[in-house]
Structures are given as structure tokens and as C-alpha cells.
């Protein structure tokens, strides 16, 4: 968790990293070798202000506490990274999303992945998994990102990229499926 906080703090509060880390659609769509592809890897660490950074860090901490019952810190960090990269790639197919920064998309993926992992654990963990999965699904339904991928939120003072939340949730489910397939394949071979 400390690594997530430190890396995201650097990309949020160091101006050069912030400017060169943010997802900018135009920079990713430049012709030929001029494309700034690294933004697909860095955008999840960039936050728009200290409040945005702190909110995402608290959400990540909460997920670590909830899903940590079913997965170790390394597995959770890997799931966060996979989901974060998947979100940035998915945003390339959303022309309405001109820029993006933050962990919220990846965190939605981590929440789904963690919820599914919890369902395979003890009874209390299953209850947490069901509640976590239901919470994410209800939130996604209420956001209705398929109607408006970006929506200005006056409380935050910027456009919330709801499409990133949905993409993250799909990525979390996909990562869980890939791990299930891999584990079954290894068991069949071994």
C-alpha cells in the first residue's frame, strides 16, 4: 500500500511527472513514433489534486482491508496494475474521454476481482464478497456510463470518467477469469 501511495503522490504532486503522466488522448493518437504510449502506464498514478489522491488512497486501503482476507498484497497489486492498464487501453475507444487520471478505474477492477476471490473463501469472507460485488454493480448501474462516459461532478470540480469505472470492473472480472483458467490448467497438467 505504501508503494501505491508513494508512486501516486509523486505523479500527483511533482509537476513534471503530473504533466507527462496524465492520459491525454491527443498525445496517444499522435502519428507514427511520436505517440506518447507511456501515458497508458502512468495515468492511473496521476491525480488531479490532493483530495482526489487522498480519496483514491483511502479507497485502495479499504479494498486492501476487505479483500486482503482472500489475497496477498502482491496479488492485489498485480490485479490493480492489470486493471489500470486495461482501463487506459479501453479509454482509447472512448472519443469523449480527452484526458484521464486517477486510480478509480483500476480500483473498481480490484473491487470486482477481490469480491470474486472472497467468494471462494470462508463464510464470513463470502458475505463480504457478496456485499462488495453488489456495491460495485449498484454503483455502476447508478452511474450509467453507457449513457455518458464522462459527467461533470460539482463536488469534485471535474468530469468523472465513469467509463473508466465500468472498464475497470470488466477488467477485474476478466483478470479473475484468466487466473481461474490458469489454475485449472496447471491442476490438469500437474
Image: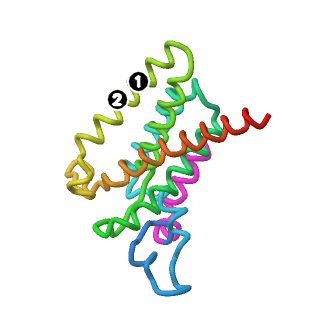
Residue 156 lies, with reference to residue 125, above or below; the image says below
Where residue 16 sits: x, y (%)? 51, 71
**Of the numbered discs in the image, which one, if any, rests on residue 183?**
none
**Residue 117 quadrant:** top right
Residue 142 lies, with reference to residue 8, above or below; the image says above
Where residue 48 sits: x, y (%)? 38, 58
CA distance separating discs 2 and 1: 6 Å
For the residue carrying disc 1, how many other residues have a C-alpha within 10 Å: few (<14), some (14-19), or many (20+)?
some
User: Residue sitting at 58 percent across and 50 percent down?
Assistant: 6
| Residue 112 magenta-highlighted | no
Q: Pick the quarter of the image with the N terminus.
A: top right
- Judged left or right of residue 121, residue 89 is left
**Residue 55 quadrant:** top left
Residue placed furthest toward the front: 188
Q: Which residue is mark 2?
A: 134
- Judged left or right of residue 172, residue 99 is left
Foreground of the two, 86 or 47? 86
User: Residue sitting at 41 percent across and 71 percent down?
Assistant: 24
User: Residue sitting at 63 percent across and 39 percent down?
Assistant: 75
For the residue carrying disc 2, how many other residues have a C-alpha within 10 Å: few (<14), some (14-19), or many (20+)?
some
* Residue segment shown in magenta: 1-19
Q: Which residue is mark 1?
A: 130
Secondary structure under tag 2 reads: helix
Amino acid at each position: 500500500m505504501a508503494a501505491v501511495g508513494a508512486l501516486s503522490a509523486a505523479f500527483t504532486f511533482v509537476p513534471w511527472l503530473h504533466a507527462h503522466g496524465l492520459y491525454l488522448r491527443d498525445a496517444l493518437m499522435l502519428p507514427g513514433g511520436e505517440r506518447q504510449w507511456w501515458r497508458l502506464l502512468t495515468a492511473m498514478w496521476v491525480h488531479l489534486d490532493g483530495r482526489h489522491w487522498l480519496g483514491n488512497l483511502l479507497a485502495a486501503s479499504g479494498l486492501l482491508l476487505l479483500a486482503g482476507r482472500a489475497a496477498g498484497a502482491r496479488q492485489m497489486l498485480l490485479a490493480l496494475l492489470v486493471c489500470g492498464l486495461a482501463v487506459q487501453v479501453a479509454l482509447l475507444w472512448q472519443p469523449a474521454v480527452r484526458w484521464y487520471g486517477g486510480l478509480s478505474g483500476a480500483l473498481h477492477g480490484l473491487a470486482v476481482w477481490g469480491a470474486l476471490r472472497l467468494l471462494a473463501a470462508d463464510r464470513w469472507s463470502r458475505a463480504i464478497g457478496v456485499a462488495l460485488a453488489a456495491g460495485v454493480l449498484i454503483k455502476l448501474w447508478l452511474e450509467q456510463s453507457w449513457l455518458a462516459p464522462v459527467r461533470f461532478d460539482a463536488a469534485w470540480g471535474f468530469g468523472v470518467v465513469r467509463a473508466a469505472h465500468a472498464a475497470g470492473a470488466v477488467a477485474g472480472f476478466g483478470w479473475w477469469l484468466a487466473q481461474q483458467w490458469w489454475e485449472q490448467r496447471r491442476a490438469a497438467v500437474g
